[in-house]
Amino acid sequence: MPRFAPGVLKFQRDVFPARKDFFEKLSQGQSPEALFITCSDSRIETGMMTQTDPGELFICRNAGNIVPPHTNQTGGMTASIEFASAVLEVPHIIVCGHTECGAMKSAMQLHDDSSSLDTLPHVREWLGYSRAAVDIADALGNGKSDKDRMRLLLEQNVVLQLQHLRTHPTVALRLAQGELELHGWVYDIATGMVDVYDEAQNRFVPIDERYSL
């Protein structure tokens, strides 16, 4: 039995009964405040990090918190973005990267050695959506330490995925109507700090500085 199976029983026995009215309300529908796009990395716990309850975030996760540019080809990310923006009408979309991201390490490795992911063709193709961020980090990070170069890549990848978001028709429409705001975050696993992209300054700043908390 998986180690987390007893957790389900604990939820059913202890947690659910104490919040039965809350879950009954949730069963009637959802109205999340944000579409939260982040990495599949098991160390990222969105509810804990944002201190939100079920129903408050519409969450999409994948390797590298990647948003493919819009095409006529249907995919899970494209469909979820369309649903969140056009049907749920979320007022915010957050792209959240994180430190020690294996996907971004692989993207950098692929840049340095094009044969490094030959045995993982789907991963290789998926990371192609981060290629521009890798190129930017490589150019701007010349002479920097590996740690600083990786941090630059994490940030540039978030910025790139925000650009990709704007190619999705439902997102573009609601941005033009002033009904949607995009946010870029980088979460530091070791410190708990979250930095947010400030487009006016073209740099990442602490979350309390960006939102005047």
Image (cartoon, rainbow, N blue to C red):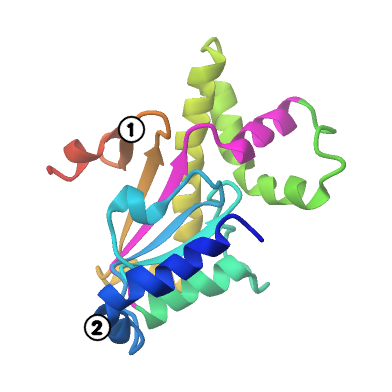
Q: Nearer the viewer, mark 2 or mark 1?
A: 2
Task: Give the residue at x 59% y 58%.
Answer: 68
Cα distance in 3D space between marks 2 and 1: 43 Å
Residue 2, position as x, y percentages in the image: 64, 58
Closer to the camera in the image, 12 or 59? 12
Task: Give the residue at x 60% y 43%.
Answer: 130
Q: Amino acid at mark 1?
A: Arg
**149 vs 154: above or below:** above
| Displayed quadrant of residue 203 | top left
Task: Give the residue at x 48% y 19%.
Answer: 148
Q: Who comes first in sequence, dot 2 or dot 1?
A: 2
Instruction: Find disc 2 in the rendering and name its residue.
Output: 21
- Looking at the rendering, in which quadrant would you find the C terminus? top left
Instruction: Find disc 1 in the rendering and name its residue.
Output: 203
Residue 34, position as x, y percentages in the image: 33, 65
**Quick check: marks 2 and 1 in contact, CB under 8 Å?**
no
Check if residue 93 falls in the magenta segment. Answer: yes
**34 vs 145: above or below:** below
In this image, 50 relative to 168: left or right?
left
Residue 167 in sight from this viewpoint = no
- Looking at the rendering, in which quadrant would you find the N terminus? bottom right
Q: Residues within 10 Å of mark 2 (few under 14, many from 20)?
A: few
Residue 178, position as x, y percentages in the image: 24, 68
In this image, 23 relative to 37: left or right?
left
